[in-house]
Amino acid sequence: MIRRLKYNEIDFKKYADCLGKSEQRKYSASKNFLDVTTNNQWDILIYNDYEAVMPVPFILKKGVKIVHNPLICQQLGIFSVKDDKKINEQFLIFFQKNYLIRDYHFNETNSFDSKLKTKKNFLLYSDDYTKVFAKYSPKRKRKLRLDDEVKENSELKEINYQEAEIFIKKNVVGLDKEKDTDTLLKTLKTFHSSKHLRFLAFYYHHEITNMIAIYSDYDTIALLGTFNDKKYIKMAGASTLIDHVIRENIENYIFDFEGGNLPSIEEFFRGFRPVLKNYAVIENSKKTLIRNFARFLMRGRFS
């Protein structure tokens, strides 16, 4: 039996226990991560007594809940000891019947009988770094061999939030609104304060040319953001930063690239020879959302 629980009804200990034992375990489904990225606006669906759980983030529009995956939260979905297609399908049916959905992302382990659209992500699994590096593409290895002049005048350094914020504001791309940038910065600042997030910068002649935001939790290091000064885009600063993090962590952690749907980004990530992992998504247009809203209104399904 599947039930819906509002935030103030959730037994967070049982929720955390279910996540911790789950086959699909994801840092992005943790209470801390969701509290920050949704501002505490999330429900959960549960199967029986927390045998399986599904976090459901939402935004409020005139008091109406609309499911919307939060910024920099790539995957959520269903979490259980063993992924079960039949149970997942029950979650899916209940979810679509009881929520207005703008977009929702399941995780790469979730399987369904229904045909859902998929998106791409890339992972490097824990292994000896020399073995991981040996699989890099020839182009990526070549990029990592910096010119002597660049090598002599560059360095990698961890920076604080204030320095990162200045660079992000100057170089952020891919966000549609100024509000989205503000939301991103607020989220990164909170994660940095909680010690889950680090900013690593590539300096060339004492100037930051590239920066990455790295989130650590569970057994995963996740690339939450890559920011580049366009003037130095061909200098391979971003590749050098990512390779540095992989070299320092891959023996004990999975490295999650957190994306790969844009052709240019996919090509860049593929150079590290990660494993392609598709995950199911539900995405509805505004037109479909309005049509579903009318249907929900008639059925009195809002809560």
Image (tube, grey):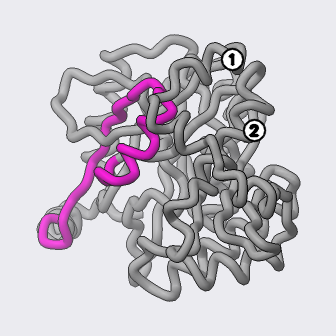
* Residue at image location 50% in from the left, 74% down from the top: 230
Residue numbers of the magenta segment: 261-288
Q: In which quarter of the view is residue 248 placed?
A: top right
Q: How packed is label 1: few (under 14 Cα within 10 Å), some, or many (20 or more)?
A: few
Please tell me which residue lies in front, 286 or 263: 263
* Residue at image location 39% in from the left, 73% down from the top: 64
- Picture coordinates of residue 188, whole percent (x, y): 71, 66
What label sits on residue 215 in the rendered view?
none
- Picture coordinates of residue 215, whole percent (x, y): 71, 48
Q: In which quarter of the view is residue 27 placed?
A: top right
Please tell me which residue lies in front, 289 or 248: 248
Q: Quadrant of the N terminus?
A: top left
Residue at image mark 2:
217
Q: Is residue 14 magenta?
A: no
Q: Residue 77: in sight, yes or no?
A: no
- Picture coordinates of residue 186, whole percent (x, y): 70, 75
Q: Residue 23: in sight, yes or no?
A: yes
Q: How packed is label 2: few (under 14 Cα within 10 Å), some, or many (20 or more)?
A: some
- Picture coordinates of residue 146, whole percent (x, y): 65, 48
Q: Amino acid at mark 2?
A: Asp
Q: Amino acid at mark 1?
A: Thr
